[in-house]
Amino acid sequence: MFAASGGKLLGYYLTFGDFDFLLISEGPSEGVATSTIAAAASGEVTDLKTQLAIPASAMVEAFNRAGPIAAGFRAPQAESQGTRAPAQH
């Protein structure tokens, strides 16, 4: 199923603890694994959690692209002091 959706299953593990199994996959987008697992579950999995993992080199590239954008970002101005009512205790 992973191959049919453009991805690849790298590992499948049965686990003890909060989760019953762990799948490790890769694909061209983060939606590949989620859609594949959802299709395979056919309603049988009721509590599915996914975690996106990004290679370090891809994160460096993302940070480099974000730098110029972040430099121009200005957070919304906080309410000016004196205009807010004091907290009630």
Image (spheres, rainbow, N blue to C red):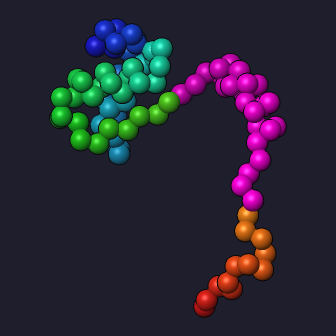
Relative height, residue 25 to residue 81 (above, below): above
Relative to residue 78, is residue 88 drawn left or right? left
The residue shown at (77%, 71%) is: 80
Quadrant in the rendering for residue 71 = top right
Q: Position of residue 7 (x, y in %)?
A: 40, 12
Q: What main secondary structure does the magenta stretch of the protein show? A: helix
The residue shown at (34%, 12%) is: 5
Residue nearer the viewer, 24 or 67: 67
Relative to residue 45, is residue 48 drawn left or right? right
Quadrant in the rendering for residue 16 = top left
Relative height, residue 15 to residue 17 (above, below): above
The residue shown at (73%, 68%) is: 79
Q: Position of residue 1 (x, y in %)?
A: 28, 13
Relative to residue 66, is residue 39 drawn left or right? left
Residue nearer the viewer, 68 or 26: 68
Relative to residue 18, is residue 30 drawn left or right? right
Give the extent of the magenta segment.
53-77
| Quarter of the figure with the C terminus | bottom right
Q: Position of residue 11 (x, y in %)?
A: 39, 18
**In this orientation, does residue 59 appear?**
yes
> Does residue 46 show up magenta in the picture?
no
> Does residue 72 show up magenta in the picture?
yes
Seen as rendered, the residue at the extreme bottom is 89
Quadrant in the rendering for residue 12 = top left
The residue shown at (73%, 30%) is: 66
**In this orientation, does residue 16 appear?**
no
Question: What count of labels does the image hold?
Answer: 0
